Amino acid sequence: MDYIIGDVQGCYDTLQKLLKKINFNEDRDRLFFLGDVVNRGNKSLETLRFIYSLRENANVVLGNHDFHLLVCSLTSQKPNFKDTFSDIINAPDKHTLLDYLLTRPVILEHQGAILVHAGIPPQWNISDAFQNAELVQQQLQNNPKQFLSKMYSDEPSYYSDKLNNEEKCRYTINALMRMRFCKKNGELEFNHKMNIDQAPEGFKAWFLHANRKLIDKDIFFGHWSTLKGFNLEHVYPMDHGCIWGEKLSAFSLSDRTLISQESIEGN
Ligand SMILES: [Mn+2]
């Protein structure tokens, strides 16, 4: 069975409980994580080691917290006081774990479903999304330190074919890993992270734009925990708030069911 799993954020104990609940068997099942596997929770190192140990049967699309870990590990950027991944930065196997993350995709397609951490801007079709993702993935693999040191910025907020590759990569990272609200032309903004009905003037949740090109594709994403329970065809918000004491969920692609585990963090 193939399962898609929402934002773990270092909640290793809840993840293990969820895997028991689905009778996970590494010889038979595959796991696809929607990013933000680390940070905020108290077992980022255990979580990342565990996913790495399953690498033949697991994959991860990078989320903003995974990306932040890479930036803090490989550039002069310092972690902030809320970050809880110093266990990874100090681990003897950190290079193995970071190299693993550097080779992860920022979007992937599996059995017709699209997996991405935050979303896909409305103006992009499938090849726009994958071509721009490929630019990011190549740089992460070939030139990570220099690339990561230039990728922290909210600009450009618009996408255009006239952008240079560095600007295209910044837009792509911000769209695929951080976006919640955008304009119908894909203009991004990052000041709001609240409920879907609190969109700033002129903006909507990325999946609500009428001009959205990927309207018929199943899209699974994390990143936006206040969307849990939201119901729109082909749109699957999978961050069910584990780190906030709510749930961690797995969606079985094989039989189209959702299995949730109450968070046991802090117990
Ligand atoms: Mn996120």
Image: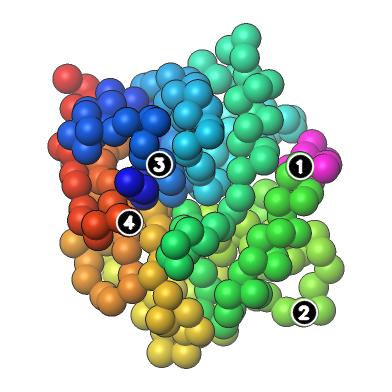
Cα distance, mark 3 to mark 1? 23 Å
Which stretch did the figure color magenta?
A: 142-148
Q: Which residue is mark 4?
A: 253
Disc number at residue 31? Answer: 3
x then y, percent, for residue 10: 39, 29
Mark yes or no: residue 206 visible. Answer: yes
For badge 4, the amino acid type reads Leu
The residue shown at (36%, 39%) is 29
Residue lying at the far top of the rendered structure: 92
| Helix, strand or loop status at disc 3 | strand
For badge 3, the amino acid type reads Leu
The answer to whether the residue labelled 2 contacts the one labelled 3, judged by CB atoms less than 8 Å apart, is no
Position of residue 114 relative to residue 55, above or below, is: below
N-terminal label among 3 and 4: 3
Q: Which residue is mark 2?
A: 161
N-terminal label among 3 and 1: 3
Mark yes or no: residue 82 visible. Answer: no
The answer to whether the residue labelled 4 contacts the one labelled 1, judged by CB atoms less than 8 Å apart, is no
The answer to whether the residue labelled 2 contacts the one labelled 1, judged by CB atoms less than 8 Å apart, is no
Quadrant of residue 257 within the rendered picture:
bottom left
> Disc 1, ligand 1: is the CB inside 8 Å?
no
The residue shown at (25%, 45%) is 249
**Main secondary structure along the magenta-highlighted residues:** helix
Mark 3 Cα shell of 10 Å, populated few (<14), some (14-19), many (≥20):
many
For badge 1, the amino acid type reads Gln
Q: Quadrant of the C terminus?
A: top left
N-terminal label among 4 and 1: 1
Position of residue 25 relative to residue 151, above or below, is: above
The answer to whether the residue labelled 3 contacts the one labelled 1, judged by CB atoms less than 8 Å apart, is no
Cα distance, mark 2 to mark 1? 23 Å
